[in-house]
Image (cartoon, rainbow, N blue to C red):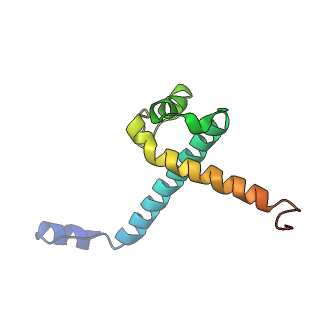
Amino acid sequence: MEGTARQSAAGRIVVNPDTLKVRHCGALVISTKSDALVKSIADLRRSIQDHDELSRAKAADLPNARGIVTGAGSAWTAQRVTAPLKKARLFLSEEASAAVKSLPTYGLF
Protein backbone atom coordinates (compact mmCIF):
# COMPACT_ATOMS: atom_id res chain seq x y z
CA MET A 1 0.00 0.00 0.00
CA GLU A 2 2.89 2.34 0.69
CA GLY A 3 4.03 1.97 -2.90
CA THR A 4 0.58 2.98 -4.17
CA ALA A 5 0.48 6.01 -1.86
CA ARG A 6 3.98 7.02 -2.97
CA GLN A 7 3.02 6.74 -6.64
CA SER A 8 -0.16 8.74 -6.09
CA ALA A 9 1.82 11.44 -4.29
CA ALA A 10 4.21 11.55 -7.25
CA GLY A 11 1.27 12.36 -9.51
CA ARG A 12 1.03 8.96 -11.19
CA ILE A 13 -2.36 7.47 -11.95
CA VAL A 14 -2.76 4.35 -9.88
CA VAL A 15 -5.15 1.64 -11.08
CA ASN A 16 -6.59 -1.08 -8.92
CA PRO A 17 -5.19 -4.35 -10.32
CA ASP A 18 -8.51 -6.01 -9.54
CA THR A 19 -10.58 -3.52 -11.55
CA LEU A 20 -11.81 -6.09 -14.07
CA LYS A 21 -12.73 -8.48 -11.28
CA VAL A 22 -14.64 -5.73 -9.48
CA ARG A 23 -16.46 -4.72 -12.68
CA HIS A 24 -17.45 -8.32 -13.34
CA CYS A 25 -18.79 -8.71 -9.79
CA GLY A 26 -20.72 -5.46 -10.08
CA ALA A 27 -22.25 -6.49 -13.40
CA LEU A 28 -23.22 -9.84 -11.91
CA VAL A 29 -24.95 -8.17 -8.96
CA ILE A 30 -26.85 -5.79 -11.25
CA SER A 31 -27.86 -8.65 -13.55
CA THR A 32 -29.06 -10.80 -10.63
CA LYS A 33 -31.05 -7.88 -9.23
CA SER A 34 -32.57 -7.23 -12.66
CA ASP A 35 -33.55 -10.88 -13.10
CA ALA A 36 -35.21 -10.88 -9.68
CA LEU A 37 -37.22 -7.76 -10.59
CA VAL A 38 -38.31 -9.34 -13.89
CA LYS A 39 -39.51 -12.44 -12.03
CA SER A 40 -41.37 -10.24 -9.53
CA ILE A 41 -43.10 -8.42 -12.37
CA ALA A 42 -43.90 -11.75 -14.05
CA ASP A 43 -45.45 -12.98 -10.77
CA LEU A 44 -47.53 -9.80 -10.56
CA ARG A 45 -48.67 -10.27 -14.16
CA ARG A 46 -49.70 -13.86 -13.39
CA SER A 47 -51.95 -12.56 -10.62
CA ILE A 48 -53.90 -10.39 -13.09
CA GLN A 49 -56.49 -12.17 -15.20
CA ASP A 50 -56.16 -10.01 -18.35
CA HIS A 51 -52.47 -9.20 -17.93
CA ASP A 52 -51.94 -8.84 -21.69
CA GLU A 53 -54.35 -5.89 -21.68
CA LEU A 54 -52.35 -3.92 -19.08
CA SER A 55 -51.03 -0.53 -20.11
CA ARG A 56 -47.50 0.36 -19.07
CA ALA A 57 -48.84 2.88 -16.56
CA LYS A 58 -51.05 0.25 -14.92
CA ALA A 59 -48.20 -2.25 -15.06
CA ALA A 60 -46.06 0.29 -13.17
CA ASP A 61 -48.77 0.66 -10.53
CA LEU A 62 -48.65 -3.06 -9.65
CA PRO A 63 -45.13 -3.19 -8.15
CA ASN A 64 -45.57 0.29 -6.63
CA ALA A 65 -48.69 -0.89 -4.78
CA ARG A 66 -46.74 -3.82 -3.33
CA GLY A 67 -43.69 -1.78 -2.37
CA ILE A 68 -41.41 -3.26 -5.04
CA VAL A 69 -38.93 -0.62 -6.18
CA THR A 70 -36.60 -0.43 -9.17
CA GLY A 71 -33.01 -1.60 -8.93
CA ALA A 72 -32.04 1.98 -8.11
CA GLY A 73 -34.63 2.14 -5.31
CA SER A 74 -37.05 4.42 -7.19
CA ALA A 75 -40.77 4.06 -7.78
CA TRP A 76 -41.85 2.50 -11.06
CA THR A 77 -43.10 4.70 -13.90
CA ALA A 78 -44.48 3.77 -17.30
CA GLN A 79 -41.09 4.49 -18.82
CA ARG A 80 -39.09 2.56 -16.21
CA VAL A 81 -41.30 -0.52 -16.45
CA THR A 82 -41.00 -0.87 -20.24
CA ALA A 83 -37.86 -3.03 -20.47
CA PRO A 84 -38.58 -5.25 -17.43
CA LEU A 85 -42.16 -5.69 -18.64
CA LYS A 86 -40.92 -6.83 -22.04
CA LYS A 87 -38.55 -9.28 -20.33
CA ALA A 88 -41.36 -10.50 -18.04
CA ARG A 89 -43.58 -11.17 -21.06
CA LEU A 90 -40.78 -13.16 -22.68
CA PHE A 91 -40.15 -15.04 -19.41
CA LEU A 92 -43.84 -15.98 -19.13
CA SER A 93 -43.98 -17.00 -22.78
CA GLU A 94 -40.93 -19.24 -22.42
CA GLU A 95 -42.35 -20.69 -19.22
CA ALA A 96 -45.64 -21.53 -20.94
CA SER A 97 -43.80 -23.04 -23.89
CA ALA A 98 -41.69 -25.22 -21.58
CA ALA A 99 -44.84 -26.37 -19.76
CA VAL A 100 -46.44 -27.44 -23.04
CA LYS A 101 -43.29 -29.22 -24.17
CA SER A 102 -43.12 -31.13 -20.89
CA LEU A 103 -46.53 -32.74 -21.49
CA PRO A 104 -46.26 -36.46 -22.26
CA THR A 105 -48.43 -36.02 -25.35
CA TYR A 106 -46.31 -33.20 -26.80
CA GLY A 107 -45.18 -33.94 -30.34
CA LEU A 108 -47.39 -36.95 -30.92
CA PHE A 109 -49.24 -35.33 -33.82
Name which residue lies at 45% across and 48% down: 83
Pinpoint residue 84: horizontal percent, then vertical percent: 49, 47
- Residue 106 vertical placement versus 76 (above, below): below
Residue 14 x %, y %: 22, 70
Above or below, 102 relative to 17: above
Q: Quadrant of residue 80?
A: top left
With 55 as the anchor, is 52 left or right in this view? Answer: right
Task: Give the camera-side residue of 55 and 39.
Answer: 55
Residue drawn 26% across the image and 70% down it: 15
Identity of the residue furthest to the left in this view: 11
Q: Is residue 86 left or right of residue 94?
A: left
**In the picture shown, does residue 93 fall above or below 23?**
above
Q: Residue at x 43, y 38 (%)?
A: 73
Outermost residue, front side: 109
Residue furthest top as drawn? 65
Work out whether residue 1 or residue 81 is closer to the camera in this orientation and state it. 81
User: Is 20 left, or right, of 59 in this rendering?
Assistant: left
Tally of marks: 0
Classify the position of the C terminus by image quarter. Answer: bottom right
Q: Residue at x 29, y 69 (%)?
A: 1
Residue 59 at x, y = what percent?
51, 34
The relative height of residue 52 versus residue 65 in the rendered view (above or below) is below
Q: Position of residue 69 (x, y in %)?
A: 48, 36
